[in-house]
Structures are given as C-alpha cells and as structure tokens.
C-alpha cells in the first residue's frame, strides 16, 4: 500500500496547495512535499523486492487490483517497485522538494497554481515509475505532460509559448506512436491483460502472431521501433532532441530542475522496461545501430553545447550527451552497462539540477546569463561559485562524485558488450568526456574568473538560497564514494536482463 | 597486518581532514583559522610524513602488504566487484615519503611566500594543497588501476584549483583551463585503457597472483585465458599499454602533450614546486613504474616509452635554452627530466627510472622553492635579465640553489649525476644489445645532457652572479626563515640523496652500496610480483631486452664530460659582469625556440580553428535543418500553421481546458468500454 499512499498523498497535496492562498502556497507545498520524500526514503530503507519486476522478480510494495476489462483485456491497478524504479522514485521525491524550495522568491504570480502543478507532476512521475500495467503507466505518462506544459507555457521566459507548444506537440506525437505500437503488439499476442510482465513474457516466448497484414517478425519490429521512437523523443536522443533546449531554457529554474532531472528519465527508464526487457532478441540485433546513435547523440550534443553563449542553454545541451551515455549502457546488455545506465539516470538528475540551480542563481544576481557579459564572479558570489564548480566538475566526471561512477559503469559495461565493434563505438562515445570538459571549463572561466564584470550591481540572495543545491552536491558525493548504496539493488534488478541477453560482465 | 592497513590508510586521510578544516572553517569562521589553514596543513603533512616513514621502515622489515579497504561496487551477476585498497610495497612506500616530505616543506615555505606577502584567499589555497596532498598520497598507495585513475583525476582537479588561485588575472584562469583540458585529453586514453583492462581481465589489481599483470603474463605463456576480444593477446596487451600511456604522457607532460606545464607556472610558486615538479607530474611516470609488470611484457610499448622520453628530454631542453623567466626555464627542465625517467623505464631500467624520480623530486622542488624565494625578493618579477648579483644578497638560497643546479646538470657527486647516469647507462646497454630505437633515444638523451648543463648554469649565472641589472635586484634582501629553512634542507638532500644508489661505481664499491636497488629488488614476503628483480626477469625473458656489458664508469665519464661542456659554455658567456643574450648564434632557430616550435599555436588552432567552427556548424545545422524539419512537419501535418497559432494564443485556461478535456475523454472511453457505466 505504500505506493498508493505516496500517490494519494501527493495528489491530495497538489489539490490542497491549489486551494491555498497564494502567500502560503510555497510554504505549504514545501512542507507537503516532505511527505512523499519521507515516504520514498522509507521505501528505500524498507525495500524488500528481489529481481526484476517484469522478469519473474518480486517487486516491493506490490498491489494488484482488477480494475476494468476492455474487449477481453484486463486492465489492473498494478503497482510495485523493483531495483530499477526505486532509485527513480527517490530521485523524483528529492528533486520535487528541491524544485519547490528553489521556487521561493522566483515565482511571484499564480503561486498556488504553480506549486500545485509541481506536486501534480511529482505524483504523475511517481505513477510512471511504479506502474506495472501498461494502461496505468500510460495514463500517468500522459498526466506528466499536462502540468509540465502549463508550467512552461505560463511561467516561462520570453519564448515560452513556442517552447511549450513544441514540447507538447513533440512528446504527444511520441506518446501516440508508442501507444499505437504497443497496442498493436498486444493485439497480436495471445495475452488477456495489459500487465507489463505478462506482455513481456508472451513477446519473449515468441507468442506474437502476424496481424494487420504484417508478419510476426515485422510486427514485432514495428512495435519495437514505435516504442523506441516514443522514448527517444522523451529522452531527447539526437535527432529527436530539439524540443529540449527550448523547453529547458524557457522554463523557470524550478521547472527545469524537474524537467531535466526527472522527466527525461521517463524515456530512458521506459526504454529499459519496454525495449530491453520485452525484446531481448531485437536489442541484440539492433545493438550496434543503437549504440552508434548513442555515440552520435553524445558527440553531436557536446559539440552543440560548445557553441552556446547562453549559460542556461549550454547546460540544457549538456543533458543530451548524458542521455546518450544512458542509451549506450542500455543497449550493451551487460551487468555494468545496464546497471550503469540506471545509476547514470539518478546521477544526471542530481548534477544537472545543481548546474541549473547555480546558473539560475547567477542570473538572479546579475540579471543575465550570457557568458560574455559575465566575468570574475567567484568572490562576489562565493557560494554560487562553489556550487557551480562542484556541479561542473561533477558533470565532467570528477571521481568520487556520482557522475564519474555512472559514466564509468556505462563505459565498463559497454566496452565489453557482445555486439560487433563495441570497443570502437564505446571509445568514440567516450570522447564526449573531453568535449564536456572543454565547454564547462570555459563556462567556469568566463563566469567566475577574470576581472569582475556584470551588467548590473550584483546582489547575492540569502545564503539559504542555494541550500538545496548544496544538498544535491553532497548526495552526489555520497553516491560517488558509495555507489554500492544503489548499485546493490540495481544490479539485483538487472541480473535477469543480463541472464536473458547473455551479455556477461 | 590490520594495523599496517589502518595506519597506511590514515596517510591520505589526515591531509584530507586538513582540507576540510581549511574549507569549512575558512568559509564560516575565517578568523578562527590560524595562518589561513597553514598550520593545520603543516600538522597534517607532518603526521603523514611520520606515518610514511613508519610504513617505509615496516616494508623494510618485511611488512609489504596488499589489502582491501573499501568495496566501491559489490560483485553481482557473474561480474566483478570494484574496490579500493592499499598496496604498501617498496615503490609506494618510497613515493609516500617523497610526497608527504615535499608537501610538508612546501606548506612551510608557503608561510613565507603566501602569508607573509599578504596574499588573499589563503583558506582556499591551503584547502587546495590539503586536498592535493591527500589525493596524491591515495594515488601512490592505490592497489588497482581504477583507484589510481580516481586519484589521478582528483590531483588534476587540484591542479586546476591551485593554478587558478589568482583568478582575477587572465593568465592563471586560462592556464588552469588549459592544464585540465590537455591532461584530460590524455586521461581519455587512460580511461579507455582502464575499461579495456577490466573488460579483458575482470580485475585491475596491480599486485598479487590474481592481478592483471600476472594474468597477462600467464596468458602470454598460454597458462591462462583472458578475453582479448578476438585479438592476438600480445597485440591486445600492446594496445592496452599504449592507451594507458596516453594518460602518462598527459600528466607527465611528455611530447606532444607537454604544452600545459609551462603555462601552469602561472600558479603560485610553491604550487609549482609541489604539483608541477615534484609530485603530480611524477604521477604519470609513477603509473608506468606501478604497472611495470604489465609494461615489461610489451617490448613495443617499452620502446615507445623510451623514444617519447628521449625525444622529450631533448626537445624540452632546447626550448629551455632561450627562456627569459626563471620559472619557464625550470618548467622546460621539468619536462625534459621526466623525459629521462621515461627513457629509463622504457629501456627496461626500472631501478634507474625510479631512482631519477626520487632525485628529481628532491632537486626540482629545491630549485622551484629557491626560484620562489628569488621571485619574492624581486617582487614577482621573474625576468632573469633583470636579476644578477643575488648571490651576495641571499647567500643561503644561492648555495642551496647551486646544489640543486649541480644536481640538475648532473655534476658529480650531486644527486642528478648518479640517477641520470644510471638511466643513460641502462639505455645504452639495452640499445647496443639489439634495440636500435632505444639507442636512438639514448643519443637524444645524451645530447640533452649538454643542453641541460648549459641552460641550468645560464640560469644560475644570470640570477645570482654578475652585477644587479635592475633597481629591484639591487635592493633585494635575504629570504625569510620560513623560506630559507625548507630550501636549505632540500639543498643538503640534493647533494647527498644520489648516494643511495652509486650505480656508476657498481664495479668499484660492490653491490652492497646500491641501497635503492636492493630496496626495490625485494624479495617481499607474502607479496609476489612488484619487485625490481621480477621486472628485470620479465624485461629480459618476455620483452627480449638484452644488454651488452658497458662499463658504467665509462658511460658516467662520457655524460659528465658532455654536461661539463654545457656548463663551460654557459660560464664563458654568462658568468661575466655584463652578460648579453648571445641568442643570435642560433640564427632563425632562435625564433622557433622562443615560440616553442609553435606547438601552442597549433593547439590553439585545433581548438579555435577546428573544434569551434565545427561546434558552430553543428549549432547552425541543429537550428536550421534538424529543428527546421521538426517545425516544418508540425506546421504542415498537424493543423494549418495560422490556425495552430490561433489555438496557441489563447489564455492559460484554454490550454488547461483542452488538456483536461482530452484526458477526461480518454478516461471515459476506457471506463465505458470497461463496462463501468
């Protein structure tokens, strides 16, 4: 019942905040967001699941309630957590609290609605990561879109309309495609439910029959590609990424934290849940082209980031290579590859939020985020500078922070992957770590070092302003020193994939 | 040996505590931090030094150990665990003594160089030094390649931090970035090599029967099978060895990645002494020594190491010939001297390479600290042409600096003579033993000896001899005690430390006086592998490096004569009351040397002429083509674009209504079909 409690509390909190007077909304939201946070941390400590939820494992906090029946297909209320979803649930709760706290003083209109939408997003995200029935999952998946769209469209920067519509259209098309793809697959498979485990079992065991004028093989391939397309858009793999820089840049900082920190992870998480789990044969077959796509995503995204002059847009672009690394690990089908991909999702969520909070703090203090208009802020904004340095080096893969751990696991797993030319593709993608150092060091040099220069008087906000970012840095260091805190359960959950695809390492 | 492990683990942890103290107290209550954190750092490095010496003595008493300290990732799914540990053997025990010793002296020296000069940001400075010392010590004690990489990167971060200490000025800010970026380029190869090692052997451990060098040896002998991904094992190991070498070349500033080191001189001089001369730059060659059991299996890589080393020794020495700033001369000399260490290791001379690492750390830290004292006396003017006559004004520094210079030039009996000659002698015997490329590397190293003698004494004469050539030099006073004492201690060491291995006198005095060789030879009870004796067997049996007998005394006399020739030329040109540049004899080469062979220009061009236009092109492509397709598709296929715009321009409530309506309809369909109504 824990998952239900989490979802219910969060949804109720969202409505409570919506009804609260604007001047109390922020404080109320901060307090209420602690409930799912504590709940998720309790879930972490009380976690007793084993194995993979879709591959015969026992999820923790599982409940199955028959819900409706459509044309012979059972749709159940089926939720539960395993080693892959648990870290993302905790990440969601942590980053929502961070976003709520970070919004204080930054949002000054329609505050009740703003905070309510943040909490509504959290609830929907928790649903996505805990649903084990396709229909339930899809409802939550679409639920995320609504508040996210509004948060960008109403509270965003000057180009918010364009960015919001683009985000909405883009991800909605993706949702449609993946929905159709999955339903086709279910129709062609003799299952009687939308339960993810049941569908996965049926597809894996070769129970797919031809339908819609397609052979069984072609239909499986179409479904695989449709799902991949849907998740690729959400995760912003090149060339489906152009919604990302606009949305991240236009959204206000707290929203960007959720968008960059968690929403993109929906795509990569689902990629593991659907494409990797349900189609082991196709993953093996398609590993090379997908890994090449990952390498392109890394290098293309890094180069595009190198060309940015707006600090926030630069940080937005840095997300693209990181997601490329997740894809690289996911298709490697090895223990470290898959576990590393999951770990990297959490790590990226923490570090990208640190960077956005730091850049947001610079913008608040100076009124600009153009790198060439800023210089020498290191001693004017010492806390901001420290957070920016920590976030940037964490992002560059400084060891003993989580970013290094995640990328290192991915590289280790990917290098030894069973598909042809895995060594070469991995080595090429790894070159991203040099380019990322190039643009982040330039950002640090431009903003923090040199003679002092800023368009307006620099007014640092209170010291507490960056407290959430400092907490995230400490979390990142903790996970970098002790990645075993997550890797134990993650490895347990990916074990079944590894056995299935036979990757080793 | 649990107590050894605990004590050794404390060696890096104590300076780490000093780092935290300087950082946190410095931020929250700067007034409560005595000397800006210097005292905490001095206390911590003193404790580390004491523990390091104790560890050294323990190893001497047969207490070499290898133990696991921390499980980073537990093993699962038939995969391997990733762990951190400590490897205490002759090599690492020697290295921690060097690192903590130099760090202690540098901390003391900083009192004079930073505190007394009223520099700002002292807590930041001492925090950086503390973190650096901790990371460097942890690197030296690493029990596997992953752990080594972790701390290899952390020292790089500290280097960025400390080079950029004076961040207001454009020079340090840019140099910090360059240092990190160029070494990161090398580290990229090292990281590929590291994941390759893990993928191949399933372990990255340095020592023991299940270590990867041992497995590689067994695989070459056909006694073990490892996953070489379908490549012939010898070729694959060579590939891995070369990849790891990328990190070495970056960190130890070897050709072609040496360009960051001269720029790094923008950092405070004590930092240059500690990080960019004695220890961090040594991390690269230390890694080669640490992995010697692996490198000794691959003759191709050994040859590459020797060639890179010999070439760098000569190449960097030529650039040092014409430099005007005292720290620039020392920077190029550092690059050149690490070339010698590479030459020694690459030609199979493990003991010789480690020996030169030890002596160089001593005399180069000395020379940098001496230069630091001079720079303070000159009020941060580093131009040697404005110095002169400082001998009378700062005698202690002069005599110590002279000792270090004699060591650097390789004049008997100072430290560098013994170790550099051990390197050259070894390279010569292996080169003549059928390795023409090693012989070539030897010849380059030998020519560089003359250059070294010349540029070293050019520096000594211009700085200390003759008449003062500026007001500042005339008014220069003696260095303060906290700068004099570390310099004097190192001055004595630079004179005597070479006596630990009087290699050229091998035939004369007997083996028992070769303390370092016996120290590194082992045997180590309970720890197979990391001994010079074992490495030597591998170099001969597996790599096939055979030697011909050449009298070490003859080789020593040859290099001594060459060095003296260089010194003599410097004497005649620059040890005069009014020296002139004399660089015109070089003709057009002069410009080439002044501009460092235009390598910086080439690398700047790579960044601004190739990568940046490429990035801009990607950005334009992204905005026009990729995004253009998206915008095109969305405006034609969804709705006519103006109608879409009309929908978009509605107020918030419209959007909300649309979205919520859509979802409600979807849910209603589900529920209706499901028969709930």
Image (cartoon, coloured by chain):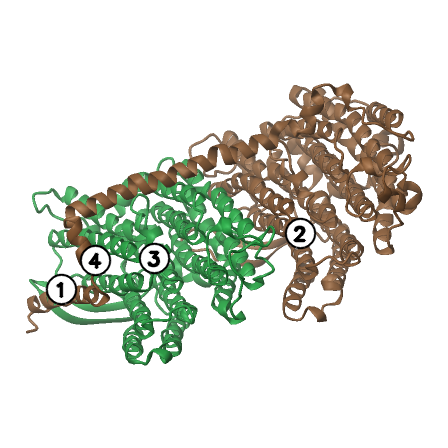
Chain letter, disc 4 residue = B
Is disc 2 in contact with disc 1, using a CB cutoff of under 8 Å?
no
| Chain A colour in the picture | green
Q: Nearer the viewer, mark 2 or mark 3?
A: 3
Q: Name above or below for residue A381 compared with residue A109.
A: above
Chain letter, disc 2 residue = B
- The residue indicated by pointer 3 is A158
Query: Which element is circle 1 on?
Result: helix
Chain letter, disc 3 residue = A
Distance Cα–Cα, label 3 vs label 4: 15 Å
Q: Residue furthest front?
A: A456
Residue drawn at (43%, 52%), measured in percent from left and top?
A: A315
Task: For the C terminus of chain B, give its image quadrant.
Answer: bottom left
- How would you rate the neighbour count of disc 4 (Cα within 10 Å): few for under 14, some for 14-19, many for 20 or more? some
| Chain B colour in the picture | brown
- The residue indicated by pointer 2 is B166
Which is more N-terminal, label 4 or label 1?
4
Q: Nearer the viewer, mark 1 or mark 4?
A: 4
- How would you rate the neighbour count of disc 1 (Cα within 10 Å): few for under 14, some for 14-19, many for 20 or more? few
Labelled disc at residue B666: 1
- The residue indicated by pointer 4 is B648
Do tags 2 and 3 sit on the same chain? no
Chain letter, disc 1 residue = B
Q: Could one spot residue A423 in this view of the protein? A: no
Is disc 2 in contact with disc 3, using a CB cutoff of under 8 Å?
no
Which is more N-terminal, label 1 or label 2?
2
Image side of residue A67 versus residue B252, left or right: left
């Amino acid at each position: 019942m824990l998952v239900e409690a989490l979802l219910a509390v969060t949804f109720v909190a969202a409505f409570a905040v919506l009804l609260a007077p604007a001047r109390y909304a922020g404080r109320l939201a901060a307090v209420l967001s602690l409930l799912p946070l504590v709940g998720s941390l309790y879930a972490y400590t009380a976690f007793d699941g084993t194995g993979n939820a879709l591959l015969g494992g026992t999820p923790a906090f599982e409940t199955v309630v028959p819900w409706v029946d459509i044309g012979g297909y059972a749709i159940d209320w089926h939720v539960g957590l395993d080693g892959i979803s648990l870290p993302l649930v905790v990440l969601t709760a942590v980053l929502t609290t961070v976003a709520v706290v970070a919004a204080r003083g930054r949002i000054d209109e329609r505050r009740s609605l703003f905070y309510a939408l943040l909490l509504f997003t959290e609830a929907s995200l928790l649903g996505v990561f805990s649903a084990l029935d396709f229909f339930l999952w899809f409802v939550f998946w679409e639920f995320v879109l609504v508040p996210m769209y509004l948060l960008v469209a109403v509270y965003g920067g000057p180009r918010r309309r364009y960015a919001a519509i683009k985000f909405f259209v883009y991800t909605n098309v993706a949702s449609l495609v993946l929905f159709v793809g999955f339903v086709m697959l279910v129709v062609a498979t003799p299952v009687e439910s939308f339960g993810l485990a049941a569908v996965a079992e049926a597809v894996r065991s070769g129970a797919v029959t031809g339908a819609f004028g397609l052979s069984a093989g072609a239909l499986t391939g179409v479904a695989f590609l449709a799902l991949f397309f849907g998740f690729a858009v959400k995760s912003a793999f090149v060339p489906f990424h152009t919604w990302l820089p606009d949305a991240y840049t236009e959204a206000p900082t707290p929203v960007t934290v959720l968008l960059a920190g968690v929403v993109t992870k929906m795509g990569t998480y689902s990629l593991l849940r659907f494409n990797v789990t349900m189609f082991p044969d196709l993953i093996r077959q398609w590993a090379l082209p997908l890994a090449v796509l990952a390498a392109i995503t890394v290098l293309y995204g890094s180069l595009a980031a190198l060309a940015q002059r707006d600090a926030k847009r630069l940080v937005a672009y840095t997300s693209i290579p990181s997601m490329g690394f997740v894809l690289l690990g996911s298709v490697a089908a090895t223990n470290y590859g898959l576990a590393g991909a999951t770990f990297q999702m959490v790590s990226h969520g923490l570090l990208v939020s640190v960077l956005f909070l730091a850049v947001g703090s610079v913008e608040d203090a100076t009124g600009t985020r153009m790198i060439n208009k800023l210089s020498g802020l290191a001693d004017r904004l010492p806390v901001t500078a420290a957070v920016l340095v920590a976030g940037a080096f964490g992002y560059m893969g400084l060891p003993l922070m989580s970013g290094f751990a995640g990328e290192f696991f991915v590289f280790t797993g990917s290098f030894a992957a069973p598909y042809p030319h895995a060594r070469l593709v991995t080595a090429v993608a790894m070159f991203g770590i040099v380019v990322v150092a190039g643009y982040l060091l330039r950002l640090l040099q431009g903003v923090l070092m040199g003679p002092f220069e800023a368009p307006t008087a620099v007014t640092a906000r209170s010291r507490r302003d960056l407290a959430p970012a400092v907490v995230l840095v400490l979390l990142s260091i903790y996970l970098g020193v002790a990645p075993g805190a997550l890797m134990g359960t993650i490895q347990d959950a990916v074990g079944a994939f590894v056995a299935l695809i036979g990757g080793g390492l | 040996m649990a107590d050894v492990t605990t004590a050794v683990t404390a060696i890096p942890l104590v300076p780490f505590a000093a780092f935290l103290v300087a950082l946190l107290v410095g931020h929250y209550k700067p007034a409560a931090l005595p000397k800006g954190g210097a005292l905490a750092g001095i206390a911590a490095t003193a404790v580390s030094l004491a523990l390091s010496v104790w560890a050294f003595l323990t190893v001497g008493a047969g207490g070499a150990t290898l133990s696991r300290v921390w499980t980073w990732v537990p093993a699962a799914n038939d995969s391997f665990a990733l762990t951190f540990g400590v490897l205490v053997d002759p090599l690492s025990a020697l290295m921690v003594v060097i690192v903590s010793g130099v760090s202690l002296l540098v901390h003391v020296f900083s009192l004079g160089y930073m505190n007394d000069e009223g520099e700002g940001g002292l807590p930041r400075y001492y925090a950086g030094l503390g973190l650096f010392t901790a990371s460097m010590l942890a690197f030296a004690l690493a029990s596997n390649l992953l752990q080594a990489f972790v701390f290899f990167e952390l020292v790089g971060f500290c280097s960025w931090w400390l080079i950029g200490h004076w961040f207001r000025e454009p020079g340090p800010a840019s140099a910090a970035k360059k240092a990190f970026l160029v070494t990161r380029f090398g580290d990229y190869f090292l990281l590929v090599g590291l994941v390759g090692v893990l993928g191949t052997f399933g372990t990255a451990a340095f020592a023991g029967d299940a270590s990867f060098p041992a497995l590689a040896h067994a695989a070459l002998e056909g006694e073990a099978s490892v996953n070489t991904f379908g490549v012939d094992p010898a070729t694959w190991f060579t590939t891995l060895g070369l990849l790891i070498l990328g990190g070495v070349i970056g960190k130890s500033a070897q050709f072609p990645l040496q360009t960051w080191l001269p720029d790094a001189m923008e950092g405070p001089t004590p930092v240059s002494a500690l990080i960019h001369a004695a220890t961090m730059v040594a991390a690269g060659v230390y890694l080669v020594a640490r992995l010697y059991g692996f490198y000794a299996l691959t003759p191709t890589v050994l040859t590459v190491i020797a060639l890179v080393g010999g070439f760098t020794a000569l190449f960097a020495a030529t650039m040092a010939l014409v430099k005007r700033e005292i720290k620039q001369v020392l920077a190029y000399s550092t690059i050149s001297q690490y070339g010698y260490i590479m030459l020694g290791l690459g030609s199979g001379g493990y003991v010789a390479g480690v020996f030169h690492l030890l002596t160089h750390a001593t005399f180069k830290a000395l020379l940098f600290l001496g230069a630091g004292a001079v720079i303070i006396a000159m009020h941060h003017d580093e131009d040697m042409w404005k110095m002169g006559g400082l001998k009378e004004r700062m005698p202690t520094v002069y005599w110590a600096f002279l000792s270090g210079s004699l060591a650097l030039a390789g004049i008997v009996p100072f430290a560098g003579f013994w170790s550099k000659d051990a390197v050259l002698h070894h390279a010569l015997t292996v080169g003549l033993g059928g390795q023409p490329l090693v012989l070539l590397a030897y010849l380059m190293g030998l020519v560089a000896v003359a250059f070294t003698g010349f540029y070293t004494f050019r520096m000594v004469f211009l700085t200390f001899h003759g008449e003062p050539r500026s007001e500042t030099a005339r008014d220069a006073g003696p260095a303060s005690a906290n700068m004099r004492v570390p310099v004097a201690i190192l001055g004595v060491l630079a004179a005597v430390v070479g006596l630990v291995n009087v290699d050229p006198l091998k035939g004369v005095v007997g083996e028992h006086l070769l303390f370092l060789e016996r120290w590194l030879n082992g045997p180590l009870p309970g720890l197979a592998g990391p001994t010079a004796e074992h490495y030597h067997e591998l170099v001969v049996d597996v790599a096939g490096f055979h030697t011909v007998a050449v009298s070490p005394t003859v080789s020593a006399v040859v290099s001594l004569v060459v060095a003296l020739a260089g010194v003599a030329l410097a004497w005649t040109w620059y040890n005069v009351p009014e020296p002139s540049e004399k660089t015109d004899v070089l003709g057009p080469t002069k410009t080439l040397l002044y501009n460092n062979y235009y390598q910086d220009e080439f690398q700047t061009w790579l960044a601004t002429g190739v990568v940046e236009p490429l990035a801009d092109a990607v950005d334009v492509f992204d905005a026009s083509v990729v995004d253009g397709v998206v915008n095109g598709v969305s405006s034609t296929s969804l709705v006519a674009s103006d109608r879409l715009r009309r929908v978009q321009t509605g107020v918030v409530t419209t959007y909300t209504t649309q979205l919520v309506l859509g979802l409600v309809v979807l849910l209603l369909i589900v529920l209706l079909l499901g028969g709930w109504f």
